[in-house]
Each structure stands twice: as structure tokens, then as C-alpha cells.
Amino acid sequence: MINLKIMSTPSLNADITLIGGGVAGLWTQRLLEQSGYSTLLVDKNALGSGQTLASQGMIHGGQRYSLLGHLTEHTKKIAAMPGQWDSCLENRSFPHLKGVASLSQKQHLWSPGGLLSNAASFFASKALQNQARLLKESEWPSVFKANHSFSGKVYELSERVIDVSSLVSFCHAQNKAQTLKGYPVDFQQEKNSISSLVVQTEQGQVNLKSHGFLFTAGLGNEWATQKFLDFFKRAGISRKETNGESAPFCQRRPLRQVVVKEVAHSLYGHCITADPRPRITITTHPGAVWYLGGLVANYGTEHTEKEALSYAYKELYELFPHINWKQCEFGSILVDRAEPFTRAQLLPEDPEILSVNTVGIGWPCKMTFAPLFGSLALEWAMQRVSNKSRFAKIETPTELQAAVGMAPWLASVSWKKPAEFGVR
Ligand SMILES: Cc1cc2nc3c(=O)[nH]c(=O)nc-3n(C[C@H](O)[C@H](O)[C@H](O)COP(=O)(O)OP(=O)(O)OC[C@H]3O[C@@H](n4cnc5c(N)ncnc54)[C@H](O)[C@@H]3O)c2cc1C
């Protein structure tokens, strides 16, 4: 083990340094380590504590988009992802992830009932009949069975929901000795190429030397694109707005997710209406927590927390009137999705690694895309490491290793009873 305290100029060497330990960094680290590369994963916070542990963990196969007539590149690429996740979860492909738990093997699509023409044709479509299974009443999730006024339809999709906390803990357990809690503050260059990063840790600065530095830092990628802007400019790499003006490399799209506890039913799925975006997306987490996304989470980005919680309450009351929501507690989580810039400020089609000499800056764009992102990252690493002398596997001192984060509703939510946000 390297004792950084007694070294006059502390330094750590690995074939590839990853900066950012969300799903992109953790997945890539497992993949590279299993492919024979030495790695170091640097995170300024606990692992997963960016978007990853805030995500709903739904591994989409794109059916929902294609059924709604959105046959884009995104839809086609995402269709291959659930199979690739299965392969890793069963240790048939790298990274081996056997031991990572799933919250559900299925997702549901349901109509709230009533006359919503677009949704009605969606639910009658041939495509839906081919890709999803219409459930008999006896097969419905318990929350619909218990709702005697429910008049909608329920379909089942064979798409799993990952337990994201389990994924983060699993990856950490495999490679915790190759993690470092800290953040880059500067870099050194040799012949116009970045040769090392200076990282601030709780015990001072450390010099990291690698053949490649891959930023998988979510919002932290904004720092990297600014820091290496001159390198990108010299390499002629830029992005443009529709009017030809220079655009930033990164975009943020906010969500205000709502959490509700305790709900006595488990549900994983989307409520479909005339709007192509789900009216509400619900996942269920340990502690009988319902985690709400979809349009409910979009609404909250332009409203106060009080308004967002009242809106979520109204939606839940309309959709599941048989549940006594006044007994529950509500909270919200504001989180930005960090993505490569798109002109329309929409979800990019697929993952990306922006690359200039030894530096890469990467976004998976969705957790579902982790296998595709991992393939891009492995190819990127192979190009940087080939023909170079390799660094041995490193072991960071325990006190400098990164810890595992917590789901945001366990860490930072201020829980409120409905009366506190205006429900009488
Ligand atoms: C509310 C929400 C729900 C979602 N639900 C789903 C879903 O159901 N299915 C799906 O496929 N996708 C979903 N997504 C998208 C998915 O979560 C993200 O695409 C994915 O988690 C991004 O992972 P990442 O590793 O790139 O970034 P992050 O998870 O944000 O990780 C970045 C890491 O970098 C670290 N970091 C930041 N700056 C620095 C720095 N300067 N130095 C060192 N470390 C740094 C952070 O601490 C963090 O740990 C959801 C996203 C959100 C916000």
C-alpha cells in the first residue's frame, strides 16, 4: 500500500483515471479492471450521490417511445440495452454484476381510464399488443385491484428496475481500494498533452499520472469542459447553436422528483395519457417509499415545493382515490440531469465521449445506456493505453477512499404531512 503521508510529492499512477463515481464511472471502472487495466476512480462526494442514486433505476427498452410513434435513433439503440444489462447481471459479459439486486423484473403501463383519444389508440395499437402483455384483472398489481373505481387497462413490459443503491454498493465493494475521495484542481501537460492531474484530497494534494483521464462527473463535466477549452479549440472541436453561435458543451435539465411514504403497495410503471410523456412514473423503494417522476417531476421545476407537493397529491388522489394520502408524508428532490448540449435542449440520442488527446469527457445520458457507454469507454481506453508501459494495480490508503452515497430520500428530504402544504 502507498503511504501518501510520508511521500514528499504524493503521486498515484494508473492506466486510466476516472473522475466521477456515478453509474458511468463505476460501470467503466469494473469493465476496465476486468479487462486488465489498472484504474483509479476519483469522486469529490460519496459514490452515486449525483444523478445516479436520484434515478428511478428503470432499464428502458424503448417500447414506450416506439409505441408512441417516436422511432428515433435513441429508440433503436436503447432497444438493445435491457439484454446487455441481463448479460452483465448474469456474469455472461463484462462487467460482471451478479449480486446487484433488481427491485422489479417488470414495468407496467396503465391508462387512467376515461376518454383520452390518443391514449385510447395507443392502448389499442398492434405494436403494443406485440410488445406488452395486457393483464387480466387477476394479474393486476395490488394497487389497481384495491381500487374499485379503476376502469383503465394495465399492460406489463419485460423491463427490469434496478436497485441503484445495490449497484453502487456492489461496484464499490469490488474496487474500493482503487477509489480516491477528492476533486481535480489543476493539470500538468507534456508536449501539448495532459500528463497528470492535481487532485485535492482531505489530506492535501495528490498528483495522478495516467495514460488517459476520463471525466464521468455529471455536472462536474462542466468544470472539465471549461478547463480544457483551449485544447478543444485547438483541436477544432466545438458545438453550435442553430443560429451558428458557439454553444456550451454541456446542458442541464432539471427535475423535481416527489417522494411519498408509506404506501402499502408496490408499483413500477408509467401512467399513459394523450401526452407522449408519462403523466406520472412510479417506482417503489425500501421503506414503502413511492418515488414519482414523469410530468409530476417536470411540474415541480417551475413551481415552489409547496405547489409541487400539492400537485403530486392531487394526481395521486385522482389516480388512486382509495388510498388515504392524508396519512402519508411527502417530500421533493430537485436534481439536474447533466448531458451533452443539444440544440433543442432535449435528451440526447445516445451516450457520448468528447475527446482531446489524453482527456475524455463522457455522458451516458441515461442509466439504461451504461452498457453502451462502457463499450465506448473501453475503446477510448484501449486507444490511449496501447503501446504504453502499463501501471500496476494501485491501492489507496483506506482513509482516502471514497464512501458509498445514500438514496436522496434517506439523506436530504424534509418530509411534510399534506396539511403542511395546504391540503385540507
Ligand atoms: C431524477 C432522475 C431519474 C432518473 N431515472 C432514470 C431511470 O429510471 N432510468 C435511466 O435509464 N436513467 C434515469 N436517469 C438518468 C440517469 O440517472 C443518469 O443518466 C445517470 O445517472 C448519469 O450518471 P453519471 O455517472 O454520468 O453522473 P452522476 O450520477 O451525476 O455522477 C457524477 C459523479 O461525479 C462526481 N463529481 C462531480 N463533480 C466532480 C468533480 N469536480 N470531481 C470529482 N467528482 C465529481 C459526483 O459527486 C457524482 O458522484 C434519471 C435521472 C434523474 C436525475
Image: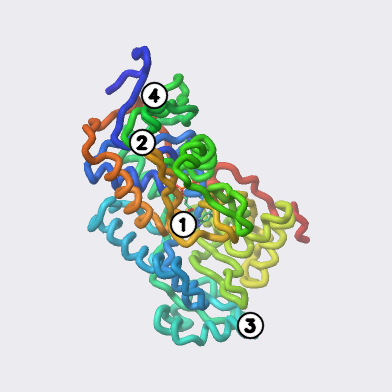
Q: Amino acid at mark 1?
A: Lys
Residue at the disc numbered 3: 116
Q: Residues within 10 Å of mark 3 (few under 14, many from 20)?
A: some
Whole-Å distance between the Cαs marked 2 and 1? 22 Å
Q: CA distance from mark 2 to mark 4?
A: 11 Å
Q: Is residue 203 above or below residue 152?
A: above
Question: Which mark is on residue 17?
Answer: 2
Report whether 407 appears left or right of 175. Answer: right
Mark 2 against mark 1, which lies toward the viewer?
2
Q: At 39% across and 24% down in the image, what residue appears?
A: 207
Alpha carbon separation for disc pair 3 and 1: 29 Å
Q: Residues within 10 Å of mark 4 (few under 14, many from 20)?
A: some
Q: Amino acid at mark 2?
A: Thr
Q: CA distance from mark 3 to mark 4?
A: 60 Å
Mark 1, Cα crowd under 10 Å, few <14 / some 14-19 / many 20+, is many
Measure the alpha-carbon separation of dots 3 and 2. Answer: 51 Å
Disc 1 CB within 8 Å of nearest ligand 1 atom: yes
Label 3 residue SS: loop
Give the structural element (helix, strand or loop) at label 4: strand
Choose the circle earlier in sequence order: 3 or 1.
Answer: 3
Which residue bears the numbered disc 1?
366
Image quadrant in which you'd find residue 314: bottom right
Horizontal and vertical percent for residue 276?
58, 73
Q: Amino acid at mark 3?
A: Leu
The numbered dot on residue 207 is: 4
